[in-house]
Amino acid sequence: MSATDFPAWSRDVAGRMETVLAGLLPSPRITPSRLHDAMRYATLGGGKRVRPMLVFAAGEVAGAEAARLEVAAAAVELIHAYSLVHDDLPCMDDDVMRRGKPTCHVEFDEATALLAGDAMQSLAFQLLAEHRLADDPVVQLQMIQLFAVACGSRGMAGGQAIDLDAVGQAITLPELENMHIHKTGALIRASVLLGARCGRPLGAAELGGLDRYAKCVGLAFQVVDDILDEAADSATLGKTAGKDREAGKPTYTSLLGLPEARKFADRLLGDAHEALASFDARADRLRQLADFVVRRDR
Amino acid sequence: MSATDFPAWSRDVAGRMETVLAGLLPSPRITPSRLHDAMRYATLGGGKRVRPMLVFAAGEVAGAEAARLEVAAAAVELIHAYSLVHDDLPCMDDDVMRRGKPTCHVEFDEATALLAGDAMQSLAFQLLAEHRLADDPVVQLQMIQLFAVACGSRGMAGGQAIDLDAVGQAITLPELENMHIHKTGALIRASVLLGARCGRPLGAAELGGLDRYAKCVGLAFQVVDDILDEAADSATLGKTAGKDREAGKPTYTSLLGLPEARKFADRLLGDAHEALASFDARADRLRQLADFVVRRDR
């Protein structure tokens, strides 16, 4: 596929992920069916699938097989979707709208949403252990380990805890950055590294470049989220707009103002391209994806 | 250690687990410290450590190294402890007392308890991937897979969902059994199988025997829990007594009555011993542990 048809490629990844996730999630015909319904509701039929795109794009750099990338991408997307389910619960952000439909606990109930999130996390690890993702099983164990760290208290869950502590607080730009490096950055980095490790072994310089790329894209993703939250309306976003500001949550736009936040996102985009400077055309999808993350309108 | 000193052995396992878990859990000096505090609060300083005992006792059958069993036992106990944290939340059982102290969301807050449970699950998988548990890494991937299935929607989380659906319902004995096979049985089976697979490869007959043993002990554990919940007071139990009955939850005592429930537990104990009939003295710890599970008074 040529580098010019990014929209077609991204639609292809999103469509494929829908099929893959629908096949890997337990059927609602299996007991407990309400729980399985909730897991499918929270995972299928929505989302930009940015993390799966990162898995596939990083996999292209390492020439990874599509079958492996599909499993890795499904695991990442399950973790992302479970984090949204728990994040939307009344004791967290108490949100009622997500991806243009009622949040999981509104559609089902709080207890079912809690357990669905828990079971989605287990399923992600199950997939990473039961499918072959690397020629060397020792590499596969390392992939599971890096993924678990990205999900845990020093990764995504830790970022959510830092976020909780920050509500209503005056925090600095480095503190905000630290929160996002954990809350969204960790799983985005894991997406890139998992995708790359599904293929041929890369050298330390290549892995280092991918990691720098992922850090920049992860942070840019959040800055743009804040910009969109400030500028867009709920219908375009598919979730409640302006909510972070109302909740007293620190954002890039509240700290920097809209124009400076836009400049910051552009600078991060430049850094992401710079991190890939020594890569050949196999990194073009990653380059396009960085552009997409920063230029998107929802 | 001779087969006669079970109390000393069980104290040794419990003491060792406290040290191992304290070392493996993130320090509260690391950010986010409140989250790490909550994870440690929910895991350390309490619990009967029955699942770690099962890991160690099954490990003896297969001559497994203590260092491997410690990691496997820590992973199992983290999952058990996280399930209690989430189970105690207001949207689930809404319990305020656990292991003789305030539940995690009472001591901290709901959001922190939710995230602590989430991060404890991630940590369990991280441990199983980052430490060497089997000579063959392919076996280790199989161990992670069976563990993930035991935690997920067709294991422990699924059992909690079945439990939710059963509140206030008239259910039959087979339905109650199905709930417990998932809710507590799955993790107890995983404890035995993980412990055994840390050691020398066992044959299908031996693994089958261990699996039957684990099923009987898992179910007996729950029957005895119901008997104790009915008969004991809160001070002895360290948690709110009689709560299941008040909540309209079906129990073995409510379905069978106390005397029949006691007979059922004894029959399961006999079946557990029967499943180990072809094993030599290396299975004595498992035999003693079955006796302990059924004869315990809290």
Image (cartoon, coloured by chain):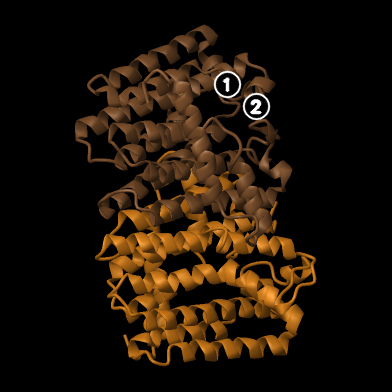
Chain colours: A brown, B orange
Q: Earlier in the sequence, mark 2 or mark 1?
A: 2
Of residue A278 and residue B80, the one placed in the foreground of this image is A278
- Check disc 2: other Cα within 10 Å, few if <14, some if 14-19, many if 20+: some
Question: Looking at numbered disc 1 in the image, what kind of residue is underneath it?
Answer: Arg
Question: Does the rendering let one see residue A172?
Answer: no
Residue designated by label 1: A298
Residue type beneath disc 2: Gly
Give the quarter of the image for residue B94: bottom right
Front-most of residues B174 and B284? B174
Residue at mark 2 shares a chain with residue at mark 1? yes
Residue sitting nearer the eye, B78 or B209: B209
The chain containing the residue under callout 1 comes to A
Q: Left or right: where does residue A204 sit relative to residue B266? A: left
User: Is residue A133 visible from the viewing direction of this image?
Assistant: yes
Relative to A82, say whether B175 is above or below.
Answer: below
- Tell me the subunit letter for badge 2: A
Q: Secondary structure at mark 1?
A: loop
- In the displayed structure, does residue A62 sit left or right of residue B242? left
The residue wearing badge 2 is A238
Label 2 to label 1: alpha-carbon separation: 8 Å
Q: Residues within 10 Å of mark 1 (few under 14, many from 20)?
A: some
Q: Are marks 2 and 1 in contact (CB under 8 Å)?
A: yes
Query: What residue sits 54% from the left and 22% below the top?
Result: A225
Name the spot of residue A16 as percent of width and height, x first. Answer: 49, 38
- When the figure is inspected, residue B38 is found, relative to residue A258, above or below; the finding is below
